[in-house]
Each structure stands twice: as structure tokens, then as C-alpha cells.
Image (cartoon, rainbow, N blue to C red):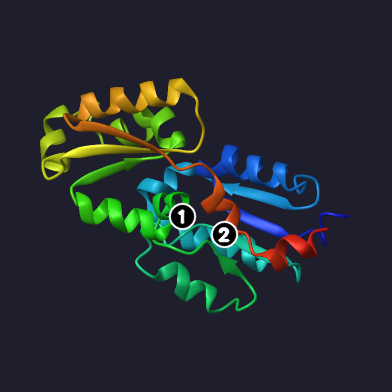
């Protein structure tokens, strides 16, 4: 199948490992094209919509899915996709919700609203995306201003890599938060890829 007619996923760079794993276990790595946008858009969500528009305008007529939830765009992503009614996106407000599942994430949020969440990717890249991304490497005194209302850090892991849990614990310590860990796996992300989209790729 050529690149011009393969189904396309335009995804957040924070999902590289997880999306490859999901596509791999469905036999789709070679039949779906995936384009990844920079993961640091996590900290600059206003850049997500312009970056996506460029790819959507140049995709042709092939089936397309956006590998983002709302991800801090405040509804701007959904407004964009109304211009492309054939394009779907991952449901939910953010990656924590679609990895954990809406019901379980709502339970965690209601249980302790002051929770800062990490995925595997964010735990492994905490220094670059959170510590440096928020300028705490230059102004550590801002930590309590940013995180003073938080009480715990919750690692929602996709794999069973012990290094990820270690990274999560270290992140919690640096932020002065209690650490908790729940393994949620990849089923939420897999379920977000529509059956019709997967079938069209075969």
C-alpha cells in the first residue's frame, strides 16, 4: 500500500512507544502511516491546532485519525475538526483519561482532585518536559507556586518497566508530593482506534 492511500494517524510525540505497540499487536505498523508532532506541545497547547492543520490540509482523501485528546486546547481542536468531518480524534480531555479509561480517571480525580499525573513518557522525560519546561531548573522557587495545591503524584503506567516507576518516584520527590502508581496498560489507547479505521487499513 502506498503512502498516498494508507490510513494516516497524526499523533502527539509523547505517544510514539505506546502507539507503535498498539499498532504492532494489531499487525498495523506497516499499513498505517503515523506522523508525530513534537511532544513539547504538551507545554504549548496553543501550537497543536496550527501544526495539525498543516498535516490535515496536505493528507489527501485517505482515512485520518488525530492522536490527541483535547490536550489543553480548550475546545480549539474540536473546532478545527469540525472543518474535517471525516477525521476522528481520541476521546477525552487528555492522555491520562484515555490511558486510564474515563470512568477510572473520574474516580481518581474525585478521590483526590489535587493530583499531578504522569504517563511512562512524561516520567522518563520529566526533567526536560516538566522541570526545565516550566523553568524550575532556573527558578526552583516557583515549584511551590506551581504545585502548592497538589497533594500527590500519580503515575499511570503503560508498561511494567521498573525504571519508569523509579523515575516517577524521583519526580514526586522533586515536587514534594506523595507518590502513587497505578498500572493502566494500553487498552484505552487501543480502544480509541476505531474498528472501521483498523479494518480499512487491512
Q: Residue at x 82, y 62 (%)?
A: 5
* Residue that carries the numbered disc 2 in the rendered image: 192
Q: Position of residue 37 (x, y in %)?
A: 55, 48
Q: Residue at x 62, y 59 (%)?
A: 193
Q: Position of residue 29 (x, y in %)?
A: 75, 45
Q: Quadrant of residue 7?
A: bottom right
* Residue that carries the numbered disc 1 in the rendered image: 98
Q: From the viewer's side, name the closer residue of 200 and 74.
A: 200
Q: Quadrant of residue 22?
A: top right
Crowd tier of the residue under label 1, counting other residues whose Cα lies within 10 Å: few below 14, some 14–19, many 20 or above: many
Crowd tier of the residue under label 2, counting other residues whose Cα lies within 10 Å: few below 14, some 14–19, many 20 or above: some
Q: Position of residue 154 (x, y in %)?
A: 30, 39
Where's the C terminus, which quadrant? bottom right
C-alpha distance separating marks 2 and 1: 8 Å
Q: Looking at the image, do the residues carrying marks 2 and 1 touch, with CB atoms under 8 Å apart?
A: yes
Q: From the viewer's side, name the closer residue of 80 and 120.
A: 120
Element type at marker 1? Answer: helix
Q: From the viewer's side, name the closer residue of 37 and 118.
A: 118
Up/down of 48 relative to 57, above or below: above
Amino acid at each position: 500500500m502506498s503512502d498516498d492511500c494508507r490510513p494516516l494517524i497524526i499523533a502527539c510525540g509523547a505517544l510514539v512507544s505506546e502507539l507503535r505497540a498498539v499498532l504492532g499487536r494489531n499487525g498495523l505498523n506497516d499499513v498505517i502511516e503515523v506522523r508525530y508532532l513534537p511532544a513539547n506541545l504538551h507545554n504549548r497547547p496553543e501550537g497543536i491546532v496550527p501544526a495539525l492543520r498543516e498535516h490535515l490540509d496536505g493528507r489527501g482523501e485517505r482515512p485520518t485519525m488525530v492522536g490527541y485528546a483535547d490536550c489543553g486546547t480548550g475546545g480549539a481542536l474540536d473546532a478545527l475538526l469540525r472543518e474535517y468531518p471525516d477525521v476522528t480524534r481520541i476521546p477525552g480531555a487528555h492522555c491520562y483519561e484515555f490511558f486510564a479509561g474515563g470512568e477510572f480517571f473520574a474516580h481518581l480525580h474525585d478521590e483526590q482532585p489535587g493530583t499531578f499525573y504522569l504517563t511512562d513518557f512524561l516520567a522518563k522525560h520529566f526533567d526536560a518536559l516538566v522541570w526545565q519546561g516550566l523553568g524550575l531548573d532556573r527558578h526552583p522557587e516557583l515549584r511551590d507556586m506551581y504545585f502548592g495545591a497538589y497533594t500527590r503524584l500519580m503515575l499511570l503506567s503503560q508498561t511494567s518497566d521498573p525504571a519508569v516507576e523509579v523515575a516517577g518516584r524521583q519526580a514526586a520527590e522533586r515536587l514534594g508530593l506523595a507518590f502513587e502508581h497505578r498500572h493502566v496498560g494500553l487498552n484505552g489507547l487501543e480502544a480509541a482506534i476505531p474498528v472501521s479505521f483498523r479494518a480499512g487499513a487491512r
